[in-house]
Image (cartoon, rainbow, N blue to C red):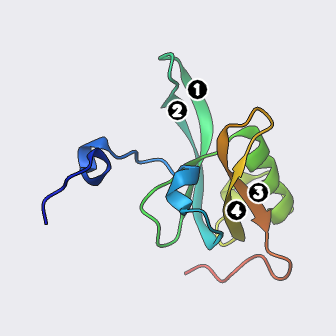
Amino acid sequence: MTATRVSDLPAYQSKWLKADDLQGRAHRVTVKAAVAEDVRSDNGDTETKIIIAFGGAHKRLICNKTQAAALAAAAGTDEFAKWAGLTVILEPGRTRNHQDTVTITAMPDNPFEATP
């Protein structure tokens, strides 16, 4: 099948998870890894951010402060290296200034799954 949209071409796809990637619905995911990495902002500056990889997902999430706080609260620790195995719900949402975002909600019971 021939690509007919820009979004169909891998060269134009972002490697970062965005709200649109969730396709309007909630997803139960397990954190595979959480690491600090330098990322370049739109203005060209480099900043160290927490990057989250999820089991079974190709894209990773660059955490903003709200997302990092939600993960820390769900895990019961702000030591992000200990977040692997944490199961959370990702949903598309909106910030106070009406920007699309990924919201993170803790699972109500037994948030950690066994890690391989």
Please state if 63 lies on the left or on the right of 2 as rendered.
right
User: Are there few (<14), some (14-19), or many (20+) residues within 10 Å of tag 1?
Assistant: few
Amino acid of disc 2: Asp
| Residue labelled with disc 4 | 83
* SS for dot 4: loop
| Residue labelled with disc 1 | 47
Is there a contact, CB below 8 Å, between mark 1 and mark 3?
Answer: no
Q: CA distance from mark 4 to mark 3?
A: 8 Å
Is there a contact, CB below 8 Å, between mark 4 and mark 3?
Answer: yes
Q: CA distance from mark 1 to mark 3?
A: 20 Å
Image location (x, y in percent) of residue 46: 52, 22
| Residue labelled with disc 2 | 38
Is there a contact, CB below 8 Å, between mark 1 and mark 2?
Answer: yes
In which quadrant will I find the C terminus? Answer: bottom right
| Of callouts 4 and 3, the N-terminal one | 3
| Of callouts 4 and 1, the N-terminal one | 1
Image location (x, y in percent) of residue 82: 71, 61
